[in-house]
Image (cartoon, rainbow, N blue to C red):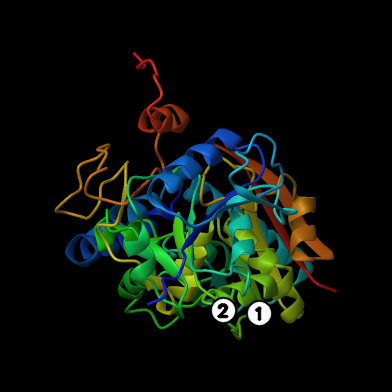
């Protein structure tokens, strides 16, 4: 049986994240995978030569995360491709995430680390786009609507997740729980919701949304010697 | 701030609070915030200035559509105080839980309807002669709505508080900016009011 290669992609735009974040993510990826690692960026300086860099002109110069929508265009990737935010940490092989993704619907994480009532009623969102899985054209519906109503969407929603929750909740596919977790909030509420715990042996990927002093926390997770703050 | 209208506001609030406590405890924080001092002052300001516009220009205001109405328990009593008790209100909010609570609060009033709609994306027919949106900082420019409803009087409020992360994404600094955002060309009144730490900005006008 022919095995399908799985690639990875990240995005670095603006000045929020340095090339170091791309390089560390790439290192984690190559430890567990053979597939290519792509980075879409407006500034390739300092990025590891092993990373397949694609330069592009960001559409948004504030709230830069909206540029992730660029990756939704149909046919952009040749192989099934998993996207990671630059503040993710890959602990293990992530093929399970891709294997359990939808080929026809847009894939997102669900914030399983919150109770569903809290996520939906208080946060008005239980969608998380820190990890996405792209197949041929499974994000086409979102891609089309975003292009059709870019300004309206951008001016109404702070981020992608809130928009997808409010407008496309029934169209998305949620990746299974217990594969990725939130460092800040836990893995799954209420059974595994201890905060600020690294779950490197039981989970594939850590998501660092809302983590304070994120760069220092990441450096510790990357194995850097970082002095503890007093 | 003390105001005689607050008696009515608190009656509504009390009715809603019992319901929140019983049915929607997750909305407790959100509900508590709807009678913050900023809400009281900004709605009082709106009612006062809208009455001035109505009187000076001899405008007829009989039915008001309120976008992003939240629970409506501050705006409705203040508008009634300034413009009269016979005005009909059509409240719109995108959040089902919010409108569920608002429907309970106004369940014995024929002159208030509560609707769960997304005014940004849904195609809606607004029935009122006046359209109010006190939350322009939360959403897209109002120009699309004013262009589709050129016969109406519009009352818009926004603010310059960009520090409310995730929420305030379309703030303005001046009434002129708000009027331009909304495409209003005939301005009846506009102003800036300092409320606690930030400026509330208002414009009342039409498209002509």
How many neighbours does mark 2 have within 10 angstroms: few (below 14), some (14-19), or many (20 or more)? some
Judging by the rendered image, the residue that carries numbered circle 2 is A141
Query: Label 1 neighbourhood size at 10 Å, few (<14), some (14-19), many (20+)?
Result: some
The residue lying toward the viewer, choosing from A112 and A79, is A79
Disc 1: which residue: B129
Query: Residue, x 27% and y 61% (percent of image)?
Result: A177
Quick check: can you spot residue B21? yes
Which quadrant of the figure has residue A19?
A: top right
Q: What element carries label 1?
A: loop
Q: Quadrant of residue A212?
A: top left
Number of numbered discs on residues: 2
Front of the two marks 2 and 1: 2
Measuring from the top left, give residue A82's x and y in whole percent: 47, 60
Q: In this view, does A21 lie above or below B78?
A: above
Q: Does residue A180 appear left or right of residue A169 in this picture?
A: left
* Chain of the residue under label 1: B
- In the rendered image, the residue lying farthest to the front is A1
At x 46%, y 48%, the residue is: B3
CA gap, disc 2 to disc 1? Answer: 37 Å
Residue in front for this viewpoint, B200 or B96: B96
Residue A26, placed above or below residue A36: above
Q: What element carries label 2?
A: helix
**Considering only vertical position in the picture, is A121 above or below A224?**
below
Residue B93 visible in the displayed image: no
Where residue A167 appears, x then y in whole percent?
A: 50, 73
Residue shown at 38%/56% (left/top)?
Answer: A123
Task: Find residue B76 and report its horizontal and vertical position in percent.
Answer: 48, 66
Compared with A163, A139 (above or below) is: below
Position of the C terminus of chain B, as image quadrant, is bottom right
Chain identifier of the residue bearing label 2 in the image: A
């Amino acid at each position: 049986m022919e095995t399908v290669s799985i690639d990875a992609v990240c995005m670095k735009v603006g000045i929020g994240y340095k090339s170091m974040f791309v390089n560390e993510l790439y290192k984690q990826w190559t430890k567990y995978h053979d597939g290519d690692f792509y980075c879409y960026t407006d500034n390739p300086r300092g990025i590891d030569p092993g990373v397949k860099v694609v330069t592009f002109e960001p559409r948004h110069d504030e709230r830069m995360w909206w540029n992730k929508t660029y990756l939704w265009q149909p046919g952009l990737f040749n192989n099934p491709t998993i996207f990671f935010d630059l503040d993710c940490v890959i602990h293990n092989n992530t093929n399970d995430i891709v294997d359990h993704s939808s080929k026809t619907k847009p894939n997102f994480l669900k914030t399983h680390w919150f109770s569903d009532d809290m996520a939906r009623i208080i946060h008005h969102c239980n969608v998380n786009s820190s990890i996405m899985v792209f197949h041929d054209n499974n994000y086409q519906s979102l891609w089309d609507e975003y292009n059709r109503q870019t300004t309206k969407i951008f001016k109404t929603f702070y981020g992608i997740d809130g928009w997808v929750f409010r407008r496309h909740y029934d169209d998305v596919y949620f990746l299974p729980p217990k594969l990725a977790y939130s460092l800040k909030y836990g893995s799954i509420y209420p059974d595994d919701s201890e905060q600020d715990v690294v779950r490197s042996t039981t989970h594939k990927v850590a998501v660092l949304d809302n983590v304070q002093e994120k760069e220092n926390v990441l450096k510790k997770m990357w194995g850097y010697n970082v002095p503890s703050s007093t | 701030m003390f105001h005689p209208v607050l008696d009515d506001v608190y009656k509504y609030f009390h009715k809603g609070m019992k319901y929140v406590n019983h049915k929607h405890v997750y909305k407790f924080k959100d509900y508590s915030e709807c009678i913050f001092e900023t809400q009281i002052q900004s709605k009082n300001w709106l009612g006062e200035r809208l009455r001035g516009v109505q009187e000076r220009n001899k405008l007829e205001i009989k039915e008001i559509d309120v976008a992003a109405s939240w629970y409506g328990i501050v705006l409705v009593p203040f508008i009634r105080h300034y413009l009269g008790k016979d005005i009909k209100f059509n409240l719109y909010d995108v959040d089902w839980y919010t409108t569920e609570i608002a429907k309970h609060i106004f369940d014995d009033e024929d002159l208030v309807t509560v609707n769960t709609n997304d005014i940004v994306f849904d195609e809606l027919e607004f029935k009122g002669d006046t359209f109010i949106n006190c939350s322009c900082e939360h959403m897209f420019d109002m120009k699309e709505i004013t262009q589709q409803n050129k016969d109406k009087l519009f009352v818009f409020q926004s603010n310059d508080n960009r520090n409310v992360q995730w929420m305030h994404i379309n703030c303005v600094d001046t009434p002129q900016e708000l009027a331009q955002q909304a495409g209003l060309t005939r301005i009846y009144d506009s102003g800036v009011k300092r409320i606690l730490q930030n400026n509330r900005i208002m414009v009342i006008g039409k498209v002509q």
